[in-house]
Amino acid sequence: MRLYKDKAFCLQKLFGFEVGKMNVRTEILAGITTFLTMSYILAVNPEVLGQAGMDKGAVFTATALSSVVATLVMALWAKLPFALAPGMGLNAFFAFTVCLAMGNSWQFALTAVLIEGILFIVLTLTNLREAIVNAIPMSLKNAIGAGIGLFIAFIGLQNAGIVTHNDATLVSLGNITSRSPLLALAGLAITSVLLVKNVKGAMLIGIVLTTIIGIPMGITQYKGIMSLPPSLSPVFCQFDFENVFTGKMAITVFTLLFIDMFDTIGTLVGVSAKAGMLQNGKIPRVREAFMADAIGTTFGALVGTSTVSTYVESASGVAQGGRSGLTSFVVALCFMAAILFSPLFLSIPGVATSPVLVLVGLFMLAPIKEIDLDDFSESIPAFICIITIPMAYSISDGIVLGLISYVLINLFCGKRRKLSVAMYLLALFFTLKYLI
């Protein structure tokens, strides 16, 4: 009995694990599920940054290490079930905009990421990021969760090839009888049945079964089990400090700051709302959560990768029941193992995780029930936020347009008491951002 109490105390102290309310097995399964849904970054990030001229093997190791460090900070300090890794979109901006379009070296881009990370640490210590989160109205916080849900589902459908690009209509139904969409639909059916039957670890089992079915279909390619990690030396601490005080560096750093800040805010708010973790509309230990991506970004720049941010795929672990830092600790352990077991993890095809993302999209819609749809001063800005996130393919733009519309509608309708000084300032800043 004493041993049990000691273990429970350790779990609570280390990860914020609440005995009686949380289950260790559930937290572990949630962590593995989150990792599997976001492990594609280990394959994608080296390919993207490789376009900028970076060594792909070194970037693989840097991606895994930065994910481990940032997620450990989230697990042990913030004690929240969110995972971090180099962000999709941010890595594309790094490679295709900063390097290829603007003609800068990847060393220049890494320097911008380093400066961004340091600035994030300063902004987090001054509580500015926390103040921005607290200034967002509750209806928009619930809308962010629903918008992210549609966004995640859209990403899942895209990754599976169920939804594809169309020049005339932007998107259209893909060839669902071809191999990848067919496997994704089979995985969606299997995982749905497991969820309906309340099978523990349904989404993790769904990923594994979908991966196995993909073997005879020629989609799952076995790549081995273990290999030594590539050296970091080609990208480690490779900075260009000669251009620190230039206009193009300032523009690059500001853009990275803006995108990362509001993607992270949106993810934390949306997933926390789905998990029922908001306390009086606020995220618990939000400053520590922000510090995780600030430290992760700074460390990531040192080892040689793009901006680290909180992943929307964390919603898959939360949907599995993850509620404490133990979930994110398991994710960190998985990334650590992936450094050595990279061939095994990279054998899981992206299409095998697509069904989980689609179903997580459903789970993330739950907070929409808390929005008063009959009060148009609340529901119209919330709706703008919800539809903008997936359609603009941007969490940050959804938040920004939702907040601007909230301020304008309530201001012109004489409901000024609902608006704080911080909301006016944010709306003005965001408007100027689009105009300039």
Image: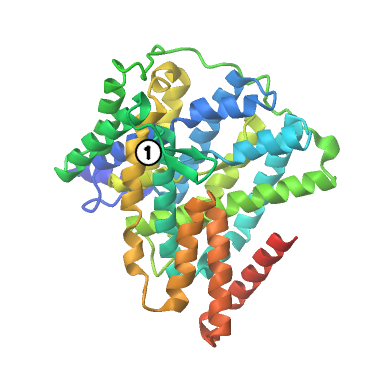
Total count of labels: 1
Q: Quadrant of residue 435?
A: bottom right
**SS label for mark 1:** helix
| Front position in the image: 388 or 308 | 388
Which colour assignment does the render follow? rainbow
Q: Which residue is mark 1?
A: 34
Name above or below for residue 73 compared with residue 362. Answer: above
Q: Residue at horizontal 45%, vertical 19%?
A: 342
Could you tell me which residue is drawn at 55 percent across and 45 percent down? 293
Q: Label 1 sits on what residue type?
A: Thr
Residue in view at x 37 percent, y 27 percent: 180
Which quarter of the rendered picture does the N terminus lie within? Answer: top left
* Residue 177 placement: quadrant: top left
- Which quadrant: the C terminus? bottom right
Q: Between 143 and 260, which is closer to the camera in this rendering?
A: 143
**Residue 429 x %, y %:** 68, 66
In the picture, measured across the screen, residue 145 lies left or right of residue 134, that is: left
Taking depth in this image into account, of 52 and 26 the one nearest to the observer is 52
Q: Residue at x 71, y 44 (%)?
A: 115
**Up/down of 69 relative to 414, above or below:** above
* Residue 363 makes an appearance in the image: yes
Residue 159 in the image: above or below residue 228: below
- Residue pushed farthest left? 197
Counting other residues with Cα less than 10 Å from the Cα at mark 1, is it few (<14), some (14-19), or many (20 or more)?
many
On the rendered structure, is 111 left or right of 182?
right
